[in-house]
Image (spheres, grey):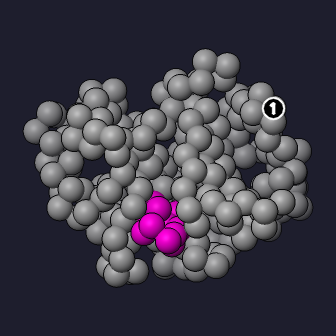
Amino acid sequence: MQAEVPFLRLTVIYNNIPFDNRLRTGWGFSCLIEGTEQTILFDTGGEGSILLGNMKRMNIDPMAVDMVFLSHIHADHTGGLEALLKKNPHVTVCLPECFPDSFKQAIKSYGANVKSLCKPTRLLHRIHSSGEMGDSIKEQALILETSSGLLIITGCAHPGVVNVVRKAKELFKVEVYLVMGGFHLAGMSNAQVRETISALKELGVKKVAPSHCTGEKAIAFFKEAWGDNFLEGGVGAIIEMPQ
């Protein structure tokens, strides 16, 4: 099926930010990436029933998932994993090396494979992990090379969304087309949000799709700053772009 798709399709399956009113919201984030060598589920949201329910409403078969990419250990990004594995244990789960052994063993008990990542790693053709970033909360971002530039997906961007983008540019020496996911700006002052926006603009980020823990006020600032290059990222949003 994937060979017939000449573009990348990003479908937000789980989010506390609404978009498609047919779908349930819940605190957390999950995004399906199609059109690549394998179908990837980025994070699994916080609750399995919401994850699987939204997948059903969007006619997404859990068995179509080949790889699960977990950004960090927090339950709002890993809570739906068990429910998914019960439906489809034939996946490889890519997670930060810092995850506890008990978590990894639980995944293996379903028959799934586990790939622990510490440093920047090529996962598939033109698809990479940023490697573990941050201090107290270790987190990895997913980086896809596309004909338009880099596509960066963050779970919460605990290490700082600017730091994530800067590292991606250092690794690949190309421009950033789109950054989407949680930017962890909820509760930040207006000045801090505008400083983040200014830094991302300086880094040449062309499009943004902030959601989850970004905060409604910050999302509004991003929408104002990027205009037509701001993309909706709430649950049910679909972004398509050339490979």
Can residue 188 be seen by looking at this rendering? Answer: yes
Can residue 76 be seen by looking at this rendering? Answer: no
Give whichever of 213, 113 is nearer the camera. Answer: 213
What is the tally of numbered marks visible in this picture?
1
Q: Per the image, is 123 magenta?
A: no
Q: Per the image, is 147 magenta?
A: yes
Q: Quadrant of the N terminus?
A: bottom right
Taking the image as shown, residue 42 lies to the left or right of residue 221, namely right
Residue at the location (47% across, 62% down)?
A: 151
Specify the segment rendered in magenta.
142-152
Above/below status of 147 relative to 13: below
Q: Residues within 10 Å of mark 1 (few under 14, many from 20)?
A: few
Residue at the location (59% across, 41% down)?
A: 238
Image coordinates of residue 102 in percent, x first then y, are 70, 58
Taking the image as shown, residue 220 lies to the left or right of residue 20, namely left
Give whichever of 132, 32 is nearer the camera. Answer: 32
Above/below status of 21 relative to 220: above
Residue at the location (34% across, 81% down)?
A: 173
Residue at the location (48% across, 38% down)?
A: 233
- Residue 218 sits in which quadrant? top left
Q: Check disc 1 and report the residue beneath it.
A: 56
Image coordinates of residue 236 in percent, x first then y, are 61, 32
Above/below status of 152 relative to 24: below
- Residue 169 sits in which quadrant? bottom left
Image coordinates of residue 20 in percent, x first then y, are 59, 24
Image coordinates of residue 98 in percent, x first then y, are 54, 65
Residue type, mark 1 in image: Lys
Q: Quadrant of the C terminus?
A: bottom right
